[in-house]
Image (spheres, rainbow, N blue to C red):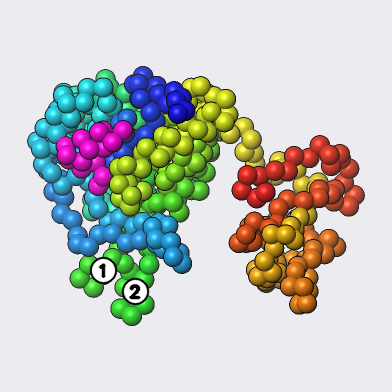
């Protein structure tokens, strides 16, 4: 059995592994968080606690899924707001959780409507025993414009509210960012200027996942109507990774402590977030689909990956991929890579030919007698679309050639990809 050190320190708090429940329906009460801890999650970000005067009134139904062919839950639309329990109930759950699981990490997510709210919430969750605070500056479906993503796009408000939280608590604090913004950097810097110790990213993406074509209403339908709300799940992972990469390569933020969120379902997803600079990881949508037990799969897979990479400590992987992602204008454009077709694997389905002809550069010819494609190198641009659509992995990266008029040593060109070859 492989046993690697998955523990990591984040904002001065020790986590036995990087996996946490994110602030959401999956960590809404004592019983849920207890079960998650028992299943092996290192931390819980308790569902966002609001001020006593803010009344949560939810709609029904409130979820929708984005599917593709036979695959459900490619993405998940959620219209739920912050914790519906009273402030007293939430604080009682925090106290009980910390008393029963002192070795686990308990993170209180809070959201106020003004400076006084933020300060008071920070004070009471600290008294209740939280190890850390997460400021929810980013929920996209709040019914008050004084809360959520409308705040998270405003650097001045974010800085002011971060400072308000620091007045009420000396706990480590991270600010949770909204992806419903072009550049997260200025907001993150404003949060740090206000006293935030780190960043959590990303919250959900504003969305309409589906339309009922008969009733001509977005889903889910609430008494004949719907609304724009947060989108999560595997489909948002590329967006989350993009924001995390941009944060870690923004001047002044190169060592920014990040708790990564957004479409983490497998150990591979977890490793990608870590390699781009996330120290801890937060999960919701895959728990809603598969249950808390998925954490064991993710932990085991991550340990096997560490063994393959000859890495003993998880912290040694954090941020290793940041420097290899560069601006598009800096990429090497001197060469192209032709596809290599393995005739023993090819089943003659023609998908590569159709995709190349209809969606790329008409570089594949089709022999009706042999039912096999052939690459016309005069037309091929090396885009590798054929590689991606092949259902049996019969196409891989092949010969590397320099473009006309370009000079260089093709033998020095590194062209490998675990997903393409």
What residue appears at the point 25 percent right and 53 percent down from the top-left corner?
80
Q: Is residue 220 visible?
A: yes
What span is in magenta?
24-40
| SS at mark 2 in the image | strand
Q: Position of residue 95 (x, y in %)?
A: 14, 28
Q: Residue at x 19, y 62 (%)?
A: 60
Taking 58 as reference, is 114 above or below it? above
Q: Main secondary structure of the magenta part?
A: helix
Q: Is residue 370 above or below residue 91?
A: below
**Res 221 label:** 1
Q: What residue does disc 2 label? A: 212
Q: Is residue 167 magenta?
A: no
Task: Work out which residue is located at the far bottom of the displayed protein and give it.
Answer: 214
- Depth order, front residue of 257/103: 103
In the image, 378: left or right of 236?
A: right
Crowding near pointer 1: few (<14 within 10 Å), some, many (20+)?
some
Task: Say what secondary structure mark 1 lies in.
Answer: loop
Say which label, 2 or 1, has the lower sequence index. 2
Using the rendered view, name the quadrant where residue 209 is placed: bottom left
Q: Which residue shows up at 70% across the image and 43% down it?
A: 416
Q: Position of residue 349 (x, y in %)?
A: 65, 70
Are the residues flagged by discs 2 and 1 in contact, CB closer than 8 Å? Answer: yes
Looking at the image, which is closer to me, 95 or 325? 95
Does residue 58 lie above or below 410 as drawn?
Answer: below
Residue 27 magenta: yes
């Amino acid at each position: 059995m492989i046993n690697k050190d998955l523990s990591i320190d984040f904002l001065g708090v020790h986590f036995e592994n990087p996996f946490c429940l994110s602030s959401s329906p999956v960590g809404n009460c004592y019983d849920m968080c207890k079960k998650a801890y028992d299943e092996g999650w290192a931390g819980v970000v308790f569902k966002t606690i609001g001020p006593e005067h803010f009344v949560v009134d939810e709609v029904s139904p409130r979820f929708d899924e984005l599917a593709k062919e036979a695959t459900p839950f490619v993405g998940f639309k959620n219209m739920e707001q912050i914790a519906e329990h009273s402030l007293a109930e939430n604080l009682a759950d925090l106290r009980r959780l910390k008393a029963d699981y002192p070795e686990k990490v308990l993170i209180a997510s809070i959201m106020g409507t003004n400076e006084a709210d933020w300060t008071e919430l920070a004070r009471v969750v600290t008294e209740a025993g939280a190890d850390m605070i997460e400021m929810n500056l980013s929920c996209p479906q709040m019914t008050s414009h004084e809360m959520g993503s409308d705040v998270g796009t405003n650097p001045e408000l974010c800085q002011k509210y971060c400072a308000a939280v620091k007045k009420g608590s000396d706990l480590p604090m991270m600010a949770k960012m909204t992806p419903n913004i072009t550049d997260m950097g200025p907001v993150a810097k404003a949060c740090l200027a206000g006293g935030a110790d780190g960043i959590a990213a990303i919250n959900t993406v504003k969305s309409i996942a589906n339309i009922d074509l008969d009733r001509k209403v977005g889903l889910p339908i609430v008494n004949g109507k719907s609304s724009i709300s947060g989108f999560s799940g595997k489909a948002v992972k590329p967006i989350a990774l993009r924001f995390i990469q941009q944060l870690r390569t923004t001047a002044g933020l190169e060592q920014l402590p990040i708790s990564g969120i957004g479409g983490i379902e497998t150990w591979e997803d977890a490793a990608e977030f870590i390699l781009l600079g996330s120290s801890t990881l937060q999960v919701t949508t895959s728990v809603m689909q598969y249950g808390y037990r998925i954490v064991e799969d993710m932990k085991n897979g991550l340990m096997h990956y560490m063994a393959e990479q000859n890495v003993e400590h998880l912290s040694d992987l954090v941020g290793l991929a940041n420097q290899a992602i560069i601006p598009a204008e800096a990429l090497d454009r001197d060469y192209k890579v032709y596809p290599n077709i393995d005739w023993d694997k090819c089943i003659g389905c023609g998908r590569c030919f159709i995709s190349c002809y209809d969606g790329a550069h008409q570089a594949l010819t089709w022999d009706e007698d042999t039912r096999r494609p052939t690459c016309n190198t005069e037309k091929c641009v090396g885009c590798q679309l054929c590689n991606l659509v092949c259902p049996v992995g019969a196409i891989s990266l092949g010969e590397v050639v320099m473009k006309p008029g370009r000079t260089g040593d093709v033998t020095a060109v590194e062209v490998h990809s675990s997903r393409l070859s």
